[in-house]
Amino acid sequence: MGRIYIFDTTLRDGEQSPGISLNLQEKLEIAKQLAALKVDVIEAGFPIASKGDFESVKQIAQKVKGPVIAGLARANYKDIDTVWEAVKFSEQPRIHTFIATSDIHMKYKLKMTKDQVLEAAYRAVKHAKKYTKNVEFSAEDAVRSDLEFLYRVFEEAIKAGAEVINIPDTVGYATPWEFGKLIKNIRENVPNIDKAVISVHCHNDLGLAVANTLAAIKNGAQQVECTINGLGERAGNAALEEIVMALATRKDFFEHETGIETRQIYRTSKLVSSLTGVNLPPNKAIVGANAFAHESGIHQHGVIEEKSTYEIMTPETIGLAESKLVMGKHSGRHAFREKLKELGYDLADEDINKAFIRFKELADKKKEVTDLDIEALISEQVIKTPEVYELEYLHITSGNKIVATATVKLKVGDEVIEEAACGDGPVDASYKAIDRAVKGQTKLVEYAIKAVTGGKDALGEVVVKIERNNKVYIGRGLSTDIIEASARAYLNAINKSFADTEINAEDVKTTAV
Ligand code: KIV
Ligand code: ZN
């Protein structure tokens, strides 16, 4: 069995997805969960892009132990110095530097000649090596690059000391046959390739990112770059969970394994989905709601007789275990603690107590509290946004023959602000009442509601995206009352905007990545 290194770029390439914006605390939570998942490398961000990116890479490097912590830099000294200032706190820091190598990128974006790009790549790696031996070099748009030139660039980068050379399909153009051959060609034609780890990074524009990644593994790639739930620019990056489970399920074919703790896959996927506000289609491979559901009678019959008739992997492998402890309003603190243990949470006493209070409130309204309910409550609690405005009271009048009205009382420090408004339905009325109570302009960009579980008494989860001060914030609210969940989600997003200390920081995200 060969070993494949998993390089997770959810917090860098994934965070570049349109409409996603994670704050520092959310990035830290995701990074900690990635460490629990046992990824080999976390690409924590692009430190030169903004003060917020820099700070989050730095804090992840300081606080998250286990994986290598990488930061991305264009092939210039300032970017590289900035990455080092952020990642140097890690026990295992990595500088990841890149430059585009395709004719189209060199001509129109970089306005550089081949010789200039070759020199820039060499000098960037040499410069990064002054800080750490762990340097990765990427040839952006490698797939559309002139092959002979690509060999030379990699040869120079390895001469300068790159320990990992990465081959991105930046625009998701390759097919598995071509991509596999490209990896083979690089392995056979770059003279010093044995001194570096071969890495691949595939985008999903044609829906082929995972297939291309697997073809690369078949042809000698040793590191794969991927994201949770396949998040990423445009159609996204290769999905970590799909690559890992393909390797695990088809060991016989791939003959390679990863160090991933697969039982953490489901939780990681849930966390990323709820913090980014990107819901998964039900038929998403591995982590979609229907990935292990059998609907047709023939399939159900088969699975009851013998699971392997229609199941090629078990839900338990990704951490979707059948619950041993059923929770309800008679469950005490001890059972709750046991349940948290069963679900794999290791919380401080204070957090367990807070979660227990919320659990009891929920159990009073709902007959059976499921694992999904508890996971939802915990994930809401773990990510604490400082509550500038706290929802103290909400009253709604609504119906099919009357104008909806809402009254809210919001607590701000010791003061309570009370406002009322009419609206086009109860959500609109409550959002208008909140708008009156809260300083500044808030625009609702997106609103989504779903039930955490089945059943009429299900916990409702609302995710909203709002715009304040020209920035987008995602808020999440939970309640068995969907209007209350809506108000909580809206306030959660507003509170995040007040907690954002870098509203005016210049955002220099490049078009290069
Ligand atoms: O897609 C890409 O080319 C990248 C590189 C910076 C690795 O994200
Ligand atoms: Zn990319």
Image (cartoon, rainbow, N blue to C red):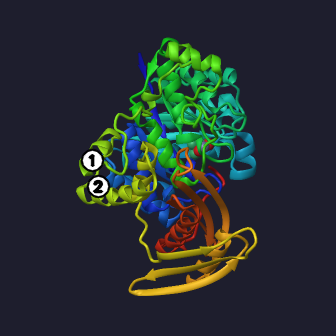
**Number of marks in the rendered image:** 2
Residue 329 seen anywhere in this rendered image of the structure: yes
Q: Nearer the viewer, residue 414 or 24?
A: 414
Q: Nearer the viewer, residue 201 or 159?
A: 201
Considering only order in the chain, which callout, 2 or 1, is on the residue closer to the N terminus? 1
**Is the residue marked by circle 2 packed among few (<14), some (14-19), or many (20+) residues within 10 Å?**
some
Q: Secondary structure at mark 1?
A: helix
Q: Amino acid at mark 2?
A: Ile
Give the alpha-carbon distance from disc 1 to disc 2, as whole Å: 7 Å
Residue 218 image point, x, y percent = 55, 18
Residue marked by disc 2: 352
Query: Is residue 255 left or right of 346 when viewed as pictured?
Result: right
- Crowd tier of the residue under label 1, counting other residues whose Cα lies within 10 Å: few below 14, some 14–19, many 20 or above: some
Q: Position of residue 371 (x, y in %)?
A: 42, 43
Ligand 1's image quarter is: top right
Q: Amino acid at mark 1?
A: Arg
Tell me the number on the disc at residue 337. Answer: 1
Residue 198 rendering spot, x and y as whole percentages: 50, 29
